[in-house]
Image (tube, rainbow, N blue to C red):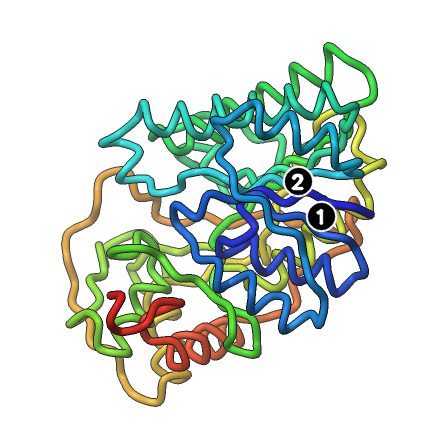
């Protein structure tokens, strides 16, 4: 199949582009590189032994999307492009609504005009808002506690409304939990610009000396060791799930949501211990006060993904940490050289 991947140069996008190329699909990347590097795509091509077509562009440019989709004869669109920092979304909500929501509307309009109605959307467990029960089922109530999560929920609603209004749409809304890890080669991985918002990249950057210590926000939660529990999923497992969703897209009647997680939670202390084991030395840390809005524990019910996609996560926390450390130790400054940092 010929597949358009928006945001293909990003963390999850690059791993999915590799999975799609390896599966024999033709991949076209659409990216503005606002939070990614073209180097990741070069490494994807090297790992796959196949080339992909690169189109520089922004979701907010409707004419560029329309031209690309009308001329491209695409079978499926896999949509990752978007801003994703929760803290930044609180500070700059209009930027997030413009980029994520308006940009996706442009994409859907362009798909509509090009008669391409098969979409795999990168959604998030943030659409569940404040969780009171685990594991989380796709049928749980939806809400959002920050602008980033609100954009994901709005896009899901838009997709559902569009699919109801017009026959022929097949949309997979993939809600994933906490992506970590890297490709086992260590050639591609997570490369956040600035200070990481997520735990694992901050832990690994601390291990290579870019930060003094890891702050653990709260050790008095009602969890086995007092620290927050999350469902961490290896990015390669996640990429494989997207590849399966592409292959199974015709089974999605209208717009349907599927959780992508391991189905079990790991605490901050457990992740830190696994990371220290992978690195070979204890990673310095300190305890800080809880952050407002952080839930004690969140993990997925992943049974629907097994039934719908024939997919389950295969890699455990140790593998996630080993692969993430391999990437970070080989690329201490990410895709940038030391002079660019």
Taking 322 as reference, is 232 above or below it? above
Q: Quadrant of the C terminus?
A: bottom left
Provide residue 64's location: percent of width, then percent of height. Answer: 57, 29
Q: Nearer the viewer, residue 222 or 141?
A: 141
Q: Nearer the viewer, residue 16 or 57?
A: 57
Which label number is shown at residue 323? none
Which label number is shown at residue 258? 2
Alpha carbon separation for disc pair 2 and 1:
6 Å
- Determine crowd level at label 2: few under 14, some 14-19, many 20+ residues with C-alpha closer than 10 A: many
Q: Is residue 174 left or right of residue 284?
A: right
Provide residue 128's location: percent of width, then percent of height. Answer: 48, 33
Residue at the image point whose x is 44% and y is 48% from the top: 33
Q: Nearer the viewer, residue 227 or 333?
A: 333
Q: Nearer the viewer, residue 281 or 235?
A: 235
Residue identified by numbered label 1: 305
- Determine crowd level at label 1: few under 14, some 14-19, many 20+ residues with C-alpha closer than 10 A: many
Q: Which tag, 2 or 1, sits closer to the chain's start?
A: 2
Q: Is residue 295 left or right of residue 58?
A: left
Residue at the image point whose x is 52% and y is 54% from the top: 9
Secondary structure at numbered mark 2: strand
Provide residue 15's location: percent of width, then percent of height. Answer: 59, 60
Secondary structure at numbered mark 1: helix
């Amino acid at each position: 199949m010929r597949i358009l991947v928006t945001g293909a140069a990003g963390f999850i996008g690059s791993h999915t582009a590799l999975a799609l190329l390896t599966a024999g699909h033709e991949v076209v990347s659409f990216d503005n590189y606002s939070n990614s590097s073209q180097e990741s795509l070069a490494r994807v091509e090297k790992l796959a032994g196949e080339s992909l077509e690169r189109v520089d562009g922004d979701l907010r440019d409707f004419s560029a999307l329309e031209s690309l989709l009308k001329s491209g004869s695409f079978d499926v669109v896999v949509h990752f492009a978007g801003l994703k920092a929760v803290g930044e979304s609180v500070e700059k909500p209009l930027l997030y609504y413009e980029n994520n929501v308006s940009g996706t509307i442009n994409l859907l309009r362009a798909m509509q005009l090009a008669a391409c109605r098969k979409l795999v959307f990168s959604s998030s467990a943030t659409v569940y808002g404040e969780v009171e029960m685990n594991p989380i089922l796709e049928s749980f109530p939806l809400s959002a506690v920050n602008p980033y999560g609100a954009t994901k929920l709005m896009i899901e609603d838009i997709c559902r409304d569009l699919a109801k209004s017009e026959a022929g749409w097949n949309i997979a809304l993939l809600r994933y939990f906490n992506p970590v890890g890297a490709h086992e080669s260590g050639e591609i991985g997570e490369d956040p610009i600035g200070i990481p918002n997520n735990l694992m990249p901050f832990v690994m950057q601390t291990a290579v000396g870019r930060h003094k210590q890891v702050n653990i926000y709260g050790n008095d939660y009602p969890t086995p060791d007092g620290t927050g529990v999350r469902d961490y999923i290896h990015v390669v497992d996640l990429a494989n799930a997207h590849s399966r969703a592409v292959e199974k897209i015709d089974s999605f009647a209208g717009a349907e949501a599927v959780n992508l997680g391991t189905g079990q939670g790991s605490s901050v202390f457990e992740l830190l211990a696994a990371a220290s084991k992978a690195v070979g030395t204890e990673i310095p840390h300190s305890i800080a006060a809880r952050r407002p809005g952080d839930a004690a524990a969140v993990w997925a019910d992943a049974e629907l993904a097994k039934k719908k996609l024939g997919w389950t996560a295969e890699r455990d926390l140790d593998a996630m940490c080993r692969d993430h450390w391999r990437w970070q130790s080989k690329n201490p400054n990410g895709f940038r050289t030391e002079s660019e940092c």
